[in-house]
Image (spheres, helix red, strand yellow):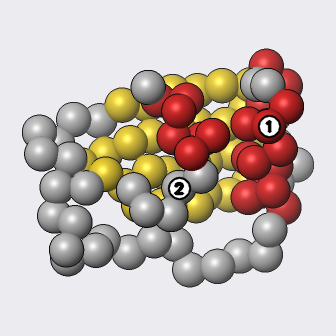
Amino acid sequence: MKIKLKREGGFAGQIIEREIDLQDLSGNVREAIESIINSKPKKSAKSNPFMRDGFVYTLEWKDSKIGKKRFDDLSIPDEIKKLLD
């Protein structure tokens, strides 16, 4: 399954995007992403007025399932955030 992770926002407004095959990821990162994909739909993160210069992360996937979830700096799992470092 292909996933796409995108980070937007921050002070400079820079966009960083990475496409990855889920099978190429290590166990704990893959498990964190699979958990998100298999979880029940929730409301995506909205912009936080107190984090004007914060980042917004978007995780998209396409396979037998198609979906997208958004996170802010406080809600994104650390394992996933590290993929963009």
Q: Position of residue 27 (x, y in %)?
A: 85, 31
- The residue sitting at 25% across, 55% down in the picture is 54
Residue at 81 percent of width and 56 percent of height:
35
Q: Residue 22 placed where, x, y %?
A: 78, 31
Residue 19 position, x and y percent, is 58, 27
Q: Check contact, mark 2 vs mark 1: CB within 8 A.
A: no
Name of the residue lying farthest toward the left = 12
Q: Is disc 1 surrounded by few (<14), some (14 to 19) or many (20+) residues within 10 Å?
A: few
Residue 51 image position (x, y, % from top left): 22, 66
- State left or right for residue 82 relative to residue 11: right
Q: Is residue 60 above or below residue 52?
A: above
Q: Is mark 1 on a helix, strand or loop?
A: helix
* Numbered label attached to residue 28: 1
Q: What residue type is labelled 1?
A: Asn
Task: Tell me: residue 7, above or below residue 58.
Answer: above
Of 81 and 44, nearer the camera is 81
Q: Name the residue under label 2.
A: 76
